[in-house]
Amino acid sequence: MNTFAIAWDSIWHHRTRSFLTALGIIIGVFAVVTLTSLGGGVQKFVNQKFAGIGANLITVAPALPTAHSHSHRHSRPVGNGPSFQAVPSTLTAQDVSALNHSGTNALRKAAGVVTVPMLIAKGSTSSSAGVMGVSYPYYGMQRMTVKAGSLRGSGVVLGDSVAHDLFGKSPALNQDVTIGTQTYKVTGVLKSLSGAPGSDPNNTAYLPLHTAMTLSHQTTVSEIILAAASAQDVNQAVGIANRILAKSHPSHNYRIITSQEILKTVTSTTSVITDFLAGIAGISLLVGGIGIMNIMLVTVSERFREIGIRKALGARDGDILVQFLTESVLLALIGGAVGTVLSGLATHIVGKAVGIPAGLTVSSVMTAVLFSIGVGAVFGVLPALRAARLMPAEALRTE
């Protein structure tokens, strides 16, 4: 307790110098904790989005043919990771029908998806919305519901933003819109909702699959979305889908990707980026530690006489070592505490601004505390050793 009091008294009587010394630690801890907290917030955000679209969803996408694929239970693409490849699709509406009639409980339903490269317009008013063709089960898989009209029918279903762009506050239901050169009646308007990462269902217009394929002169679908009975049935559903598709695609020019695979890849990428940025920010902790060491060496030089008196009164080398080490650690700990508080404020503000659940966690606070103690201890050792090794007579002769 006496050692702590002496350390605190020294810091308090040199407040300005102590603050400037701790500034490097404040900046370092602030940067590291803020980046890791925001990175964790982004991961939570992605997890929530994928949970929102369902952990039981499976995507069948076109891929390059794979050699000897009959020996594999799951199709695997050339290369690593579940990224989509820009290759021509050979998936058809017949594949969608075959998957829908699998006759098993594990594979519940399938929906084909095509992208229609055309603009949607109402008279002279056009929208930047995307146009897609989808099978009816797609709406249920993506948890889409209507606020007006129906999801069934031969017309077009508008996302909430598209309806607002084209019709403003006027009702869009039963109105005519133009896609390409064809006119379609609006049969449904979706409720506003959040979609999967990388998509915006509110800014998309949806046509029935066969209508969209005829309009865009496409004979294949862009991808097929499958729904397993539950998250536990995903692997079984993948095996069933693979067996069905292998009959019409013996070269296995498709790939089957689960939501969990995509989530794992996204999470892994986010973690690598966060760790990399935190590592760069951690350099400021190193700079802060060097600053503490320099100031502590100056402090030792200024207090030679005090050290000599304490040793003459019976203080051991270990007592002097602990005193200066405590002062160094306390200085770093104060810097870490201030940096953590500032980081908490920053992550809260940024999280609210961009809509991610970012904030301090117990692990980030503990990391900040341990880092601060570690930096103070490591960079305080040299000054503390110098103070401890001073001979009383030499120290007392110093003015």
Image: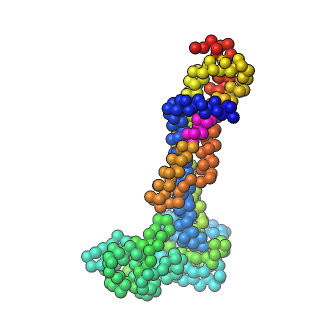
Label count reads 0
Q: Position of residue 255 (x, y in %)?
A: 56, 69
State yes or no: residue 210 in magenta.
Answer: no
Quadrant (top left/top right/bottom left/bottom right) for the C terminus: top right
Q: Quadrant of residue 239?
A: bottom right
Which of these two is toward me, 374 or 317?
Answer: 317
In reply to whether residue 331 is colored magenta, the answer given is yes
Residue 41 position, x and y percent, is 54, 57
Please name the residue shown 38% across and 73% down the image: 161
Instruction: Confirm whether residue 115 shows in the render.
Output: no
Q: Quadrant of the N terminus?
A: top right
Task: Report whether 245 appears left or right of 172.
Answer: right
153 to 92, vertically: above or below = below
User: Residue 245: x, y in percent?
Assistant: 58, 76
Q: Nearer the viewer, residue 232 or 112?
A: 232
For residue 388, side relative to residue 298 (left or right):
right
State which quadrant residue 79 falls in: bottom right
Return the residue found at the far left: 124
Instruction: From the image, give the main secondary structure of the stretch colored magenta.
Output: helix
Q: Nearer the viewer, residue 86 or 191?
A: 191
- Name the residue: 59% across, 37% down: 332
- Coordinates of residue 215 in the picture (x, y in percent): 38, 80
Instruction: Give, as a single range, the part of the protein colored magenta.
Output: 325-336
